Image (cartoon, rainbow, N blue to C red):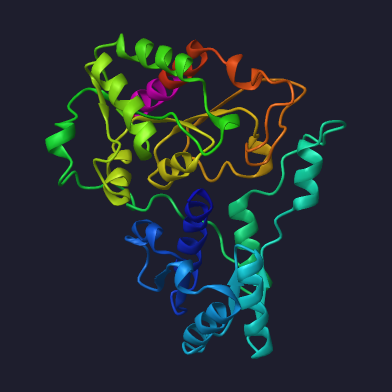
Amino acid sequence: MGDIAMTIPVLYSFAKRYPEHEVTFLSRKMVKPLFANMPANIHFKGISPDDYPGVMGLCRLFRELNASSFDAVADLHNVLRTMFLRALFKLHGVPTACIDKGRRERHELVRSLHKKLVPLTSSPERYALVFDKLGYSFPMSFTSVFADSAAPMTGLLPLTGEKGSCRWIGIAPFAAHKGKIYPLSLMDKVISLLHDDERNRIFLFGAGPQEKKQCEEWAKLYNRTTSLVGCFGMGEELALMSHLDVMVTMDSANMHLASLVHTPVVSVWGATHPYAGFCGMQAPGSRIIQADLACRPCSIYGNKKCLNRNYACLWTISPEQIVEAVYDVCSGKEAAS
């Protein structure tokens, strides 16, 4: 999901620079809401990979795509399935280009000894370079999927109520892997500290039964805290995010979703590192919270077990650090308004 979210600013900027060109973006059906407010020359084609199993399935998908007579193919994923499709297009004379994921540089960033701790090319920049290989250069002109304003609150008000003078703070405390999840006992302290200020209203984001259970427990414990898990679809969650004053996230898809609606993010990083290029295009005022430890980053995706078995990269970040960053962001927005 995060990878797809980081393509949105690039596709938007391409579409604005080249309004005479049509783009068809192929991805899983579930991410369609991300494309709801794209320029008219961006078209989304959603598929279920299970509908195109094996080599024969990919050949059938190619025939369906090739019927559109594309002038070029930009592979922003560069995995076995897209490599196969790309090869078929090349055999039929269609110009293609693919993303360079910088695997060697990323390995040097996370290796145990002699890490090369330098910022790598970001994912949005890598996506833009694919279009550049095909002859299309453009400036990044994206701000938000909702243009210059927050989204309408239609359908959200029965749960959220009017914002009024409250601060709306979103928290997405989960991620795909343990190496990216701030310990729940410490996150409880973050929520408690924020809840101490009566001006704060807290919204919890997540997915799945376990995350739903945890968020509902917090919502019962802190009365100005609302669990959104299972309440809305992605489109409605994006709309609500656009009204938040700040979003607290891990290195996760929600970090990128908040950025898509121009909401400042306080992102908490553990085993992974912003230098890997997955920070995306965060809104002005965003903050990055991370521990300065020689062992990190140890993983690009956060899926490796901690070699020290203590996840110190997360446990050494205090709840007070996160809360201070939240108030820094809020005070900056309040001063600017």
- The quadrant in which residue 336 appears is top left
Q: Nearer the viewer, residue 146 or 311?
A: 311
Residue at x-position 72% and y-position 32%: 298
x and y, in percent, of residue 321 in the image = 52, 14
Check residue 273 for magenta coloring: no
User: Magenta part of the protein: which range?
Assistant: 328-336
Q: Nearer the viewer, residue 321 or 175?
A: 175
x and y, in percent, of residue 122 in the image = 64, 48
Residue lying furthest right = 114
Horizontal side of 195 relative to 157 (left or right) equals right
Asked whether residue 289 appears in the rendered view, the answer is yes
Q: Is residue 260 above or below residue 171?
A: below
Q: Is residue 57 above or below residue 307?
A: below
Residue at x-position 51% and y-position 87%: 63
State whether the magenta stretch is mostly helix, strand or loop: helix
x and y, in percent, of residue 308 in the image = 73, 20
Asked whether residue 168 appears in the rendered view, the answer is no
Check residue 333 for magenta coloring: yes
- The quadrant in which residue 191 appears is top left
What is the number of callouts on the image? 0
Horizontal side of 175 relative to 309 (left or right) equals left
Q: Quadrant of the C terminus?
A: top left
